[in-house]
Amino acid sequence: MKPAPFAYHRPETIEEAVALLAELGDDAKVLAGGQSLIAMLALRLAVFDHLIDIGRIPDLRGIERREGDLWVGAGTTDADVERSSLVADAVPLLAKVTPFVGHFQIRNRGTLGGSIAHADPAAEYPAVALTLDATMHVASRQRERTIAAGDFFDGVWTTTMKDDELLIGVTFPEWGGRSGFGVEEVARRHGDFAITGATVGIELDNEDRIRRCSIGLLGMGSRPERALRAEREMHGRPADEIDTTELGQLAIAGLDSVPGDLHGSVDYRRRVGAVVVARAWTGAIKEARRA
């Protein structure tokens, strides 16, 4: 199949882009790297009268530290994130997860902001944003505002951004101290969307107790999920006393909308999801002890 006809717009500034969004409303769709949208258009899973290509707006690209956080422009490619020593130093979880995002050809075109705004519950960057309590920066013609990651993802392919708003950047908090991170996922092939997966961050105190932890889940609901109950129960406990098998089961137990499809039944996702949580937790603990 081929996409339905549409008008193509290529603004060169953020101001031009948000002006188009204000004018065209929900008849328009933003095109970033196009790695998800182009396929959906070709299959006519999505039809829009207007496409606004933001790929040549220089102010949407870049990686820099800002007041203790790492700022990543929404138009920054996955490949630039993957190659950045600043990302690896400041937000190791973001660096660890990027090689799981598609294949290297996709990472050359896909963008961090495009993935997050697309809000696929099986995608890696939305899960990392939720796990690390990232902040989304969005702009309209009237104003700029911020949205916490926990308030950003609304459902499958939907966010709480308004029709006239554009995601312009994301800030990720830097974890200090004895911190470690783990990523595990299961997919049919490396680079495919995850059937299930987990992103884990842990900070230990000087006595090897859990000072802080965060557990994100991929492919386990209509949006990225946090295993909040498991996080609360692990807080303050000695790392050596935690049974990772029980932890994995606890992380999955509170989910009530686990999907099932031809790639994996609900039961399969629950069983395998518990295992990937346990493995990601183990990797994060090992890294935190080396910090």
Image (cartoon, rainbow, N blue to C red):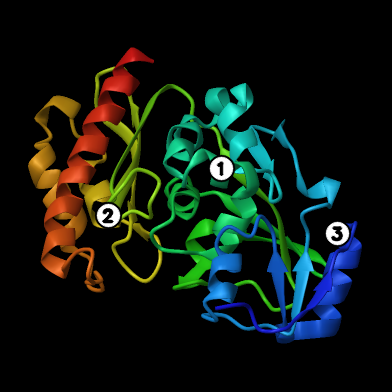
Q: Is residue 172 left or right of residue 26?
A: left
Q: Identify the residue at image location x=31%, y=47%.
A: 189
Of the two numbered discs 3 and 2 on the same chain, state the one appearing first in sequence.
Answer: 3
Camera-side mark, 2 or 1: 1
Spatial CA distance of label 3 from label 1 is: 26 Å
Disc nearer the start of the sequence (3/1)? 3
Residue at x 44% of width, y 32% of height: 96
Amino acid on which the number 3 mark rests in the picture? Ile
Identify residue for label 3. Answer: 14
How much space separates mark 3 and mark 2, taking CA atoms? 35 Å
Quadrant where the N terminus is found in the figure: bottom right
Tell which circle, 2 or 1, labels the residue nearer the N-terminal end: 1
Report whether 170 appears left or right of 19: left
- Circle 2 is placed at which residue position? 196
Residue 26 numbered mark, or none: none
Give SS at disc 3.
helix
Residue type at tag 2: Thr
Per the rendering, the mark at residue 105 is: 1
Looking at the image, the residue that sits furthest to the front is 1
State which quadrant residue 159 falls in. Answer: bottom right
Q: Report the residue at 22% width, 44% height from top.
A: 277
Determine the secondary structure under disc 1.
helix
Q: Quadrant of residue 210?
A: top left
Q: Position of residue 109 (x, y in %)?
A: 64, 47
Asked which secondary structure carries label 2, the reply is strand
Residue at the far top in the pictured view: 290
